[in-house]
Amino acid sequence: MKKLLVPTDFSDNAFLAATYAATICKKQNYSLHLVHYYTATSSGFEENDINALTADPGLLKADLTIKEWTHKLQSEFPGIDISYHNERGLLQEALSKEAKKEGYLAIVMGTTGATGAKNIFWGSNTAIITMRSPIPVIAVPNKPVHTDINKVGLLTNLKQEELITLQEFLHTIKGDIDLALIHAHKEEESLTSIQEKLELWLVNIEPFNAVRNVNYLTAPIVKDDKNLDTVPEVISKIISDNAIDLILITKSRKTFFERLFTTSVSKAMTLDLQKPAFFGKTI
């Protein structure tokens, strides 16, 4: 059976991601596998527990916690096959190795995890994993989100690799969708010219039978392009103004998705990921 891989640090944010993954599994008839990676210094447990970790590689508390998580998820989604394991190691390294095992279709994880000095900060981890993962990654924002996936937004610069991302998504999330092509353009570019290019680009979507309807959403980049935050700001505004359930981001859009996980307080409200995002696999 095909399955989704869900890493957890046992935070509320991670449980939101696990719930989102379970919803997909229920609709797609997939199974779900939870995994927790730990070290003696970044386990997310109290100091006494950290001392115990060094002496007890079995990590009894994490074993109990992940069983509790599984039971909670199983009670909410009784028809799903849920498995789990704990493993000592660094998330960024171990998760990519686990993802290469047979059967995994995608990693589903939160954009950030628990906060505080003794816990793992997941924002940077999520960005790194999206770059390294051998399978697609679905990043879930740290808030309850609409779980139906009917309207999908594809970030486009009219590149062929974006079609691969769309193909990977339709392979992972089977079902008919409405598709919006999201394009941010330079302020001096003619809107007529942009629309003509997008109309021509629509021809590339025709072979995808699961796409019921397709349109495009555009907006100009008003600020100087030297400000790397401008493109994410414009795209985030387009997404927030439209009823989009999930966005597709191609790995070549590094500037955009790296800035999504910025730690800058001044940009947090603007660049925070507001919708689940699907990142294609690393080739």
Image: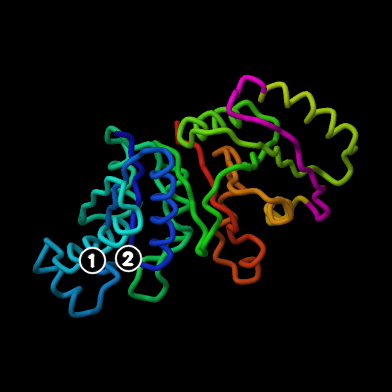
Q: Residue 96: percent from the left, percent from the top?
A: 34, 43
Quadrant assignment, res 110 = bottom left
C-alpha distance separating marks 2 and 1: 8 Å
Q: Quick one: quadrant of the C terminus?
A: top left
Q: Quick one: quadrant of the N terminus?
A: top left
Q: Residue at x 70, y 35 (%)?
A: 157
Name the colour scheme.
rainbow
Graded by Cα atoms within 10 Å as few (under 14), some (14 to 19) or many (20 or more), the crowding at tag 1 reads few
Residue 263 magenta-highlighted: no
Residue 218 magenta-highlighted: yes
Quadrant assignment, res 185 = top right
Looking at the rendered structure, which numbered label has been put on residue 152? none
Tell whether label 1 touches label 2 (CB within 8 Å): yes
Horizontally, residue 44 falls left or right of residue 188, namely: left
Q: Residue 151: percent from the left, percent from the top?
A: 63, 42
Q: Residue at x 75, y 44 (%)?
A: 184
* Highlighted range, magenta: 206-224
Looking at the rendered structure, which numbered label has been put on residue 10? 2
Q: Residue at x 49, y 33 (%)?
A: 174
Q: Which residue is label 1 attached to?
A: 65
Q: Residue 91: percent from the left, percent from the top?
A: 32, 54
Front-most of residues 236 and 256: 236
Q: Regarding mark 2 in the picture, which secondary structure is present there?
A: loop
**What amino acid is found at the position of numbered circle 1 in the picture?**
Thr
Q: Residue 148: percent from the left, percent from the top?
A: 54, 48
Q: Regarding mark 1 in the picture, which secondary structure is present there?
A: helix
**What amino acid is found at the position of numbered circle 2 in the picture?**
Phe
